[in-house]
Amino acid sequence: MRLSVFGVGYVGLITAACFADRGHSVVAVDKDPDVIARLRRGVPGFYEPGLEEMLARNLEASRLTFTTDPEEAVKQSEVVFLCVGTPPRSDGSSDLEQVEEVARSLAPLLNGYRLIVEKSTVPVNTGRLIERTLRLFAPAAASYEVASNPEFLREGSAIHDFLHPDRIVIGADSDRACALLLELYGRDCDCPKVVTDVKTAELIKHASNAFLAAKISFINMVSNLCEELGIDVTTVARGMGLDHRIGGHFLNAGLGFGGSCLPKDLTAFVKIAEDHGVDFTLLRAVEQINEERAGRLLRKIDQALWVVRGKTIGVLGVAFKPETSDIRNAPSLRIITQLKKAGAVLKVYDPQGAQNLQRLYPPDPAFAYAASPYEAAADAHALVIVTEWDEFRSLDLGRIRVLMRTPIIVDGRNLFAPDEMLRKGFEYHSLGRGGIDRETAPLRGLVEPQAASPAAGRG
Ligand code: NAD
């Protein structure tokens, strides 16, 4: 099939590359000429496992081309995917400027039947607004329909998620539109397909993301109680998650959710409900619990260090989640900003996200970028874990212990077992395991500064 994809950010680029990899002919359009020039050379603007290789083989096979010219893309495509951004406005609603802009640019180019498919996450009834825009700007004889096919991929496993989804949601208001999308996916995906009308499909996406956010805030709320009761929240979560009605995913207590989707989609969903006079207090609480997570970790850092000003803190993790370079709305941003304000000397390490942070915080004498977790730990008074990269789970803790000035770890992702950390000689603070943290507290007075050799910090 001949397809075009508008917007080659995370979703658009994965969509374009994966459809091309399945043998379709794909033209991908972005209005940013630098992005397009880079992609023509096979260089994605973000890290995603397997993406560079996939781009290379599909560019090579000429199944995937990139352009800034909408006409080049639309003139031969049967199906046009809209994958542009839908960022939040100051009142929490979705800003649909990019969606409207693409609809207007497409309209005059419609020269035969085209199916315009929303893949961007949009408020319910956006399909109707796209259709209205096309009607206003398209030639009278143009033939088109609008469908919804929300995307559920997760950054960090985006290619796998796109190629092996749990379900495909197809929102189409005609048999022809529905048949086209079923044909596009049917051949390769044997997962369940939920075929419905456009507005129901739009709502499924927002409701799904809000539910995932609610699960995370739920366990974080329970984790606050666990801290007071001296119970380990990870055991509670396991005990809950083995019930298949609950499921273990998204039940990890910690710093909460960030990124470019869950926070904004949750807020937009609440706004839609409120605009329709429906009480979504439940989801307001989900937002509020999430907001408080970074502050809770900062208080733990404060308590552990007593005086933060002038202390050296190693920060492990900048990306909003592992296996991505994306730092949009990452909890790290608040933590780093606050620690910087409090006068800490920071050494930050992330396997993929550090470069993006450098645009916000160029290196200076009180803010360094470490080349490894060990370099971040060297001479540090505390190490703060912010993102749950696998690399951090398998740290050589003995080496870390020797490198640090005072062996204090404040773990925002509960990567380690508290008793094990105690045995390894750390004062270990995590979230939702308060009783165990308290047991480690007496260690603080006993810790002696370690003399780390300058070379030990490298590598
Ligand atoms: P993004 O900001 O990374 O990418 C958007 C791209 O659209 C940019 O490259 C921008 O230059 C381009 N663009 C803007 N206006 C354009 C125009 N008129 N013509 C052509 N290109 C244009 O956004 P993203 O993270 O890929 O998200 C896109 C949509 O998908 C959003 O609605 C988001 O909520 C949704 N979504 C994102 C994810 C995710 O994990 N990132 C997952 C599922 C759904």
Image (cartoon, rainbow, N blue to C red):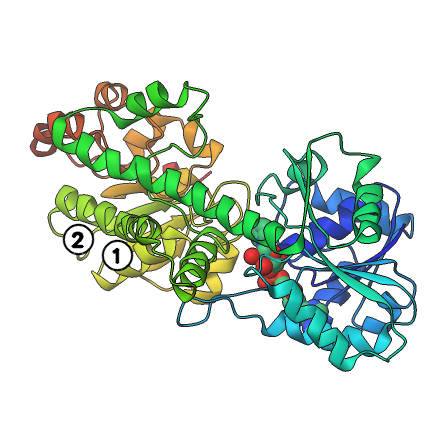
Asked which secondary structure carries label 1, the reply is helix
From the top left corner, tell me how far across and down residue 82 is, in percent. 70, 61
Circles 1 and 2, Cβ within 8 Å, touching? The answer is: yes
Disc 1 crowd rating (10 Å Cα; few below 14, some 14-19, many 20+) is many
* Of residues 45 and 378, the one drawn nearer to the viewer in this rendering: 45
Disc 1 marks which amino acid? Leu
Q: Quadrant of ligand 1?
A: bottom right
- Measured Cα–Cα span from mark 1 to mark 2: 8 Å
Going by the image, does 170 lie left or right of 433? right
Residue at position x 48%, y 32% from top? Answer: 390
From the top left corner, tell me how far across and down residue 427 is, in percent. 19, 31
Label disc, if present, on residue 308 of the rendered structure: 2
The relative height of residue 151 versus residue 338 in the rendered view (above or below) is above
The relative height of residue 449 versus residue 60 in the rendered view (above or below) is above
Asked which secondary structure carries label 2, the reply is loop
Instruction: State the image quarter where residue 402 is shown.
Output: top left
- Residue named by callout 1: 339
Going by the image, does 371 lie left or right of 339? right
From the top left corner, tell me how far across and down residue 34 is, in percent. 70, 70
Total labels drawn: 2
From the top left corner, tell me how far across and down residue 116 is, in percent. 77, 61
Disc 2 marks which amino acid? Val
